Image (cartoon, rainbow, N blue to C red):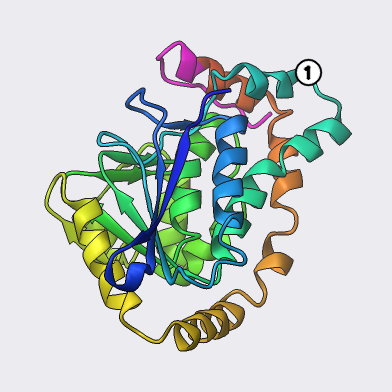
Amino acid sequence: MADFVKTEKGLGPEGRIAVVRFDRGDGINALSPEALRQLTDAARSFEDDGDTSVVVLTGGAKAFSAGFDLKDTEGRTRATMDLGALRRHLKLGPRLTRAWQEMEQITIGAIEGFCVGGGVALAVALDFRVMARDAHLRVPEIGLGMNMSWQSVPRMLHLIGPARTKQAVILADERIGAAQAYEWGLVEQIAEPGEAFATAMALAAKVAAQPPISVAMTKLTVNRLAHALDDLASHMDLDQFALAGMTEDHKEGVAAFLERRKPRFRGK
């Protein structure tokens, strides 16, 4: 089985920085079910790691992630699953983002190229995001007749507020450039092209210099306050996703994407 995720620990001052590199080597870094599992396992590998204070998550040189892999063989079996099997399979994404959000270590995403759909859902589950000046974000789910799930809507809401969240999610074809993402508060730092990882590592070094236990407790407090109602607010997003997947508009959205044409939605 291909190994898409590599973890390196013991970096930086006092060896308190780790790097998780997600790179499928194809230039787009789509999130197949197997990639989701490997990235979840990578986050969980830090559960009892008292030596690491900061984790930098980076993608490939050309892409952080193109989002869920619509062409993946396992992913395509969703079309024939019964509702029970589908609901179990759809837990892979929320499980991934929850694992990264709930890490005790501070997490920093380094974004080059593009970050789309599930890639955005993963990025907003992190503590900080560094984005290359020529990179862009996009949330295309609605344009494919789906909803934005993986509990990412409340996370985006905390970062950028209700109108910007609607703008990002509903206007599915619109790219959000680095300057716009920074202005909105969707990313915390902009780097020169090709320098997102180095900039993220510099930020990681600053965090790693702080007292690890106090940092972990502060993160936990802020997260508990900010995300207290997230489970309540988004407990239905998995089922909404399953429901949206049964619509004619979803079939039309995916077909149009694969055929590279403009979709025609009818509200059915």
Res 16 quadrant in image: bottom left
Which residue occupies the extreme left position in the image? 192
Q: Is residue 202 above or below residue 2?
A: below
Q: Which kind of residue does numbered mark 1 sit on?
A: Thr
Quadrant holding the C terminus: top right
Q: Nearer the viewer, residue 222 or 215?
A: 215
Which residue occupies the extreme top position in the image? 259
Q: Nearer the viewer, residue 246 or 220?
A: 220
The residue at 57%/40% (across/down) is 38
Quadrant holding the N terminus: top right
Q: Nearer the viewer, residue 262 or 233?
A: 233
* Circle 1 Cα neighbour tier, 10 Å, few/some/many (<14 / 14–19 / ≥20): few
Q: Is residue 237 above or below residue 244?
A: below
Q: Which residue is mark 1?
A: 80
Q: Main secondary structure of the magenta part?
A: loop
The residue at 13%/46% (across/down) is 193
Q: Is 119 placed left or right of 203 in the picture?
A: right
Q: Position of residue 63 (x, y in %)?
A: 32, 36
The residue at 64%/32% (across/down) is 267
Q: Position of residue 23 (x, y in %)?
A: 39, 34
Res 48 quadrant in image: bottom right
Q: Position of residue 243 (x, y in %)?
A: 75, 37
Q: Is residue 259 magenta?
A: yes
The residue at 49%/70% (across/down) is 105
Q: Is residue 131 magenta?
A: no
Q: Indicate the secondary structure of the residue bearing disc 1.
A: helix
Which segment did they paint magenta?
Answer: 256-268
